[in-house]
Each structure stands twice: as structure tokens, then as C-alpha cells.
Image (tube, rainbow, N blue to C red):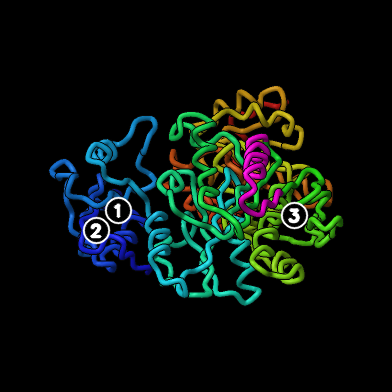
């Protein structure tokens, strides 16, 4: 745990007592703050009481006596409307912050020799993989590295700060909205495409939240920015004009005059010395398939070399990276069929990246939709058949009709069985390997608690195939439409 002494002997309300909220409460108490906690969920309040936290209903609280409100990132800050707790805090002139801001203030208050190096990573897609990849590269090179934030441990649950440590943090737009003083030595902004617009108002608001990762950088810092989308290119151009830090553009689509880029799977370092170095063949990195992972690899390479790793150390780590659970993760192979778990693909852009990684797939998709799949039309020819689940199934099917055969499978377990039967038949006919890709393009909340639970359900369903005689058990497809 990282103690936070910033509010010693002052009262702080921690609103939202899930993983990060409980860690923030414990860290504040370790820093001698008087912590008041609250959560609107009965089960969360009961768990907090079990951990000895004092609960106080905000409705009965005089906000003027608070030093700060520490808000869970899941609580609306601005859109669609501020939560009443936010409104009350602002009316009383009280700071509304998150656990990442507590971490940043704890660093600022620490003696110079105890301050760690911070690497911060955000983007619409790929941030978890890139966070895990940066952590892996640093660990393989022998660095004292710790990973947290929006992945793994909440940041304040990480080991106490000490000199020489590197904290690698995945940051969501919600977390960044609640952060004002974080100073990352290396900041990565991978990409930007429409997501969470209900919480940010519009694309400009979403981009502004993401851009906050660069807010406090200056001389000696490095900003790694993906320039394969218009928003990223615009931000890169704007901060380059400001000229306060080292800018390292990255691309998985085009050659760059400076920065890092990938063409046909080969990673190049345009190191700014009038020469370009080819540093790695990423097609040999089995856990980094596809253009989106090449962008992740370029970003990780740029960040760790900015922190002093050699090219050889970085490339060695890229080749040994084991991959990230639920993100393009091979979870099994049976009967000539490979099963790929991409449950973390909760939006259309993430699913596009997965679909584009294979020449032909049997695609399992659906859940609670954030948008339609019209923007994937160019990839429909790569889909042998789609197996649709959850709330999105009917609408996705209507879009696929006339282009791609599909099945209204309804639930994930059935979709896995149906996809396996079809993929196994194709593998037997062609003598090659068929791929069943679970890349939902949707949120999970219609049928699962989160994408991790959904991915584990896919893994279990795949494992169950080995003990079932599906040829005898499977009834005909339901709701199939042939292109």
C-alpha cells in the first residue's frame, strides 16, 4: 500500500467503495486522514464496514468541513449530469479527485530520493496490452517495476514508493478526468476513437480527458503518441508546436520521419539522426499478432528506450511477452480449430482490430451494444459465419444479412458449440487451421458482470468441448441467414 499523507488530520469523503475506493480509504487512513466512506450499494457498504471503515451518508454531511472528495471513476463527474455528491462538493468549494490524483500528490510530497518514475498509458484500445507489455519489458531488463491503475491492482494498493521504482499505470478517461497533477516521465496516448461519449458529452470532451495524461510533462519527459487517427495526429502536432518535451510519434500504418513505426510487421526506429533502424520482425512475436498489437509494440518500445533500455533489451522483451488475458488470447485448440479470446473488445474499433488480424474467422459477437457494426462492412468477407449473442444479436444480424451467414445463438455457451462444429468441418475440408474468434464489439453487462467474467466463460466453454460429442448433440442452427 502507498500511504497518502496529503490530508493528514483532515476529513476526506471517499465515495464509491469498490476496489480503488477501498484502497484509497486505506491509503488515506495510513496517512492519518479521517476517512468517511459511502457507497450507494448495500453490499459495498457492508464490505467496507467489515474492513473497519467509517460510513457517513453524504446526505447528512456538511461538505464545508471536508478537505476533498475522492470519487470512484465510475461515478458521473460531468455527463450526462454530475452526481449529486459532485454538485454538493463543488458548491462547497471542495476538490473532487480520484485515486490517481492522490497518488500524484503523494509523489509530490515525498522526498526527492523516494520519488519513483511513472509511465502512464491511455487510449481507446490497446492500453491494457501496452501497460502489460511495458511492464514486461522493464521487468525483463531487471528494473524494479510495478503495474496498476485501471489494470490489476488499484494504484494505491501497490508497494510503497521508493527510489528506483517504476510504476506503470493504465489510465482510463474516467480516471484522467479526476486527475490534475500526475507527472509521468513517459506518457503514451495510443489512439482515439468514439467511446464513452455518454460520460464525456462528445468526442471533443472524450479527447480532452485523454489528453490530460500529457498535462504536466515538460523538459526531460517523453510523450509517445499514436498518429494513425486524426485526433492523435492533431494532438501530436499541437504539442510538438509547444516544444516542451520529447515527442515520439508512433504508427502501424505508415513510415515516419521520426518516432517508431511498423510496416509489414517490421518495427523501425526513426531515431532522428538521419537514419532509420529496423529493430525487430514482429511477426515472430507470437503474442502480438495484428496491426493493433504492432502499434502497441511500437509504443512500448518508444517508452522503454526513453527510460534507458537498449534496443536489444526492448526487442528481447517483445519476443518473450506472454500476452494479456482476454485480449487476442489463444485459449485452446481442438480438431483443427484455434479459439481466440478477445473479450476485452468492448467496442467496434477493438473488434475491427481483431477481425483484421485473420484472413478468415468464425466470429462470436454481441452483448450490450455501444453502436452498430456498419463500420465493419469492409471486413464482412473475412467472416465465414457469425454467432450472435446478447442484446445486440438481432440488430447485428440485420446488418450482416445479405453479406455474411449468421446464427442467433443467444448465449455464449451455445455460440461456442455452434462455431466449433462449423469451424471443425472447414478445417477438415481444407486441411488447415480454422479460427473461432470471440471479439464481442459490445459491453458485457447484459449477461456478465464484466469483460473478464465473459472471457472466463468463453474459456470454460472451450475447455468443455473436449468432453462433448457435438456431432450427436447439436441441433440445427437457429435463425441462420445465408449471404
As helix, strand or loop, the secondary structure at mark 3 comes to loop
Specify which label sits upstream in the sequence, 1 or 3.
Answer: 1
- For label 2, the crowd category at 10 Å Cα-Cα, with few meaning under 14, some 14 to 19 and many 20 or more, is many
Locate the N terminus and report the quarter of the image it occupies: bottom left
Q: Is residue 321 visible?
A: yes
Q: Residue at x 79, y 47 (%)?
A: 256
Q: Report, in whole angstroms, how far the alpha carbon at label 3 lies from the one at label 2.
A: 49 Å
Q: Nearer the viewer, mark 3 or mark 2?
A: 2
Residue position for label 1 = 17
As helix, strand or loop, the secondary structure at mark 2 comes to helix
Q: Nearer the viewer, residue 462 or 250?
A: 250
Q: Which mark is residue 48?
A: 2
* Direction left: furthest residue: 60
Residue 442 falls within the magenta-colored stretch? no
Q: What secondary structure predominates along the stretch shown in magenta?
A: helix
Q: Report, in whole angstroms, how far the alpha carbon at label 1 lies from the one at label 3.
A: 46 Å
- For label 1, the crowd category at 10 Å Cα-Cα, with few meaning under 14, some 14 to 19 and many 20 or more, is many
Residue 233 falls within the magenta-colored stretch? yes
As helix, strand or loop, the secondary structure at mark 1 comes to loop
Q: Which residues are magenta?
A: 230-249
Residue position for label 3 = 336
Specify which label sits upstream in the sequence, 3 or 2.
Answer: 2
Locate the C terminus and report the quarter of the image it occupies: top right
Label 2–label 1 contact, CB within 8 A? yes
Amino acid at each position: 500500500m502507498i500511504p497518502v499523507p496529503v490530508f493528514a488530520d483532515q476529513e476526506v469523503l471517499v465515495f464509491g467503495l469498490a476496489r480503488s475506493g477501498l484502497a484509497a480509504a486505506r491509503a488515506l487512513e495510513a496517512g492519518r486522514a479521517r476517512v468517511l466512506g459511502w457507497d450507494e450499494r448495500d453490499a459495498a457498504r457492508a464490505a467496507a464496514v467489515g474492513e473497519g471503515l467509517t460510513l457517513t451518508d453524504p446526505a447528512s454531511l456538511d461538505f464545508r468541513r471536508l478537505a476533498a472528495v475522492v470519487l470512484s471513476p465510475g461515478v458521473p463527474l460531468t455527463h450526462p449530469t454530475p452526481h449529486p455528491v459532485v454538485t454538493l462538493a463543488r458548491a462547497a468549494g471542495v476538490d473532487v479527485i480520484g485515486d490517481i490524483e492522490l497518488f500524484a500528490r503523494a509523489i509530490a510530497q515525498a522526498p526527492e530520493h523516494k520519488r519513483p518514475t511513472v509511465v502512464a498509458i491511455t487510449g481507446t484500445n490497446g492500453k491494457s496490452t501496452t501497460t502489460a507489455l511495458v511492464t514486461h519489458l522493464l521487468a525483463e531488463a531487471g528494473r524494479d517495476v510495478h503495474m496498476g491503475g485501471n489494470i490489476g491492482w488499484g494504484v494505491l494498493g501497490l508497494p510503497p514508493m521508493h527510489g528506483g521504482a517504476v510504476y506503470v499505470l493504465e489510465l482510463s478517461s474516467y480516471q484522467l478526468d479526476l486527475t490534475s497533477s500526475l507527472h509521468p516521465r513517459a506518457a503514451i496516448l495510443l489512439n482515439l476513437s468514439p467511446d464513452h461519449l455518454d460520460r464525456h458529452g462528445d468526442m471533443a470532451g472524450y479527447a480532452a480527458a485523454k489528453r490530460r495524461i500529457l498535462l504536466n510533462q515538460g523538459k526531460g519527459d517523453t510523450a509517445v503518441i499514436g498518429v494513425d487517427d486524426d485526433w492523435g495526429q492533431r494532438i501530436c502536432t499541437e504539442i510538438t508546436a509547444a516544444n516542451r518535451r520529447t515527442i515520439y510519434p508512433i504508427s502501424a500504418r505508415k513510415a515516419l520521419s521520426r518516432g517508431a513505426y511498423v510496416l509489414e510487421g517490421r518495427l523501425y526506429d526513426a531515431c532522428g539522426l538521419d537514419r532509420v533502424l529496423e529493430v525487430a520482425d514482429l511477426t515472430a512475436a507470437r503474442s502480438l499478432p495484428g496491426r493493433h498489437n504492432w502499434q502497441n509494440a511500437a509504443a512500448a518500445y518508444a517508452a522503454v528506450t526513453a527510460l534507458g533500455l537498449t534496443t536489444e533489451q526492448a526487442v528481447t522483451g517483445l519476443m518473450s511477452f506472454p500476452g494479456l488475458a482476454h485480449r487476442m488470447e489463444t485459449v485452446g485448440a481442438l480438431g483443427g480449430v484455434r479459439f481466440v479470446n478477445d473479450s476485452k473488445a468492448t467496442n467496434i474499433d477493438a473488434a475491427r482490430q481483431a477481425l483484421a488480424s485473420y484472413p478468415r474467422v468464425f466470429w462470436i459477437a454481441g452483448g450490450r451494444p455501444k453502436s452498430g457494426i456498419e463500420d465493419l462492412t469492409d471486413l464482412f468477407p473475412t467472416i465465414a459465419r457469425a454467432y450472435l449473442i446478447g442484446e445486440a444479436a438481432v440488430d447485428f444480424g440485420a446488418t450482416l444479412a445479405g453479406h455474411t451467414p449468421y446464427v442467433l445463438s443467444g448465449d455464449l455457451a451455445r455460440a461456442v458449440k455452434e462455431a466449433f462444429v462449423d469451424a471443425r468441418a472447414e478445417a477438415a475440408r481444407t486441411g488447415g487451421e480454422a479460427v473461432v474468434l470471440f471479439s464481442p464489439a459490445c459491453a458485457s453487462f447484459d449477461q456478465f458482470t464484466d469483460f473478464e467474467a465473459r472471457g472466463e466463460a468463453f474459456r470454460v466453454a472451450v475447455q468443455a468441448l473436449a468432453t462433448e460429442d457435438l456431432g450427436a448433440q447439436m441441433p440445427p442452427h437457429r435463425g441462420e441467414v445465408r449471404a
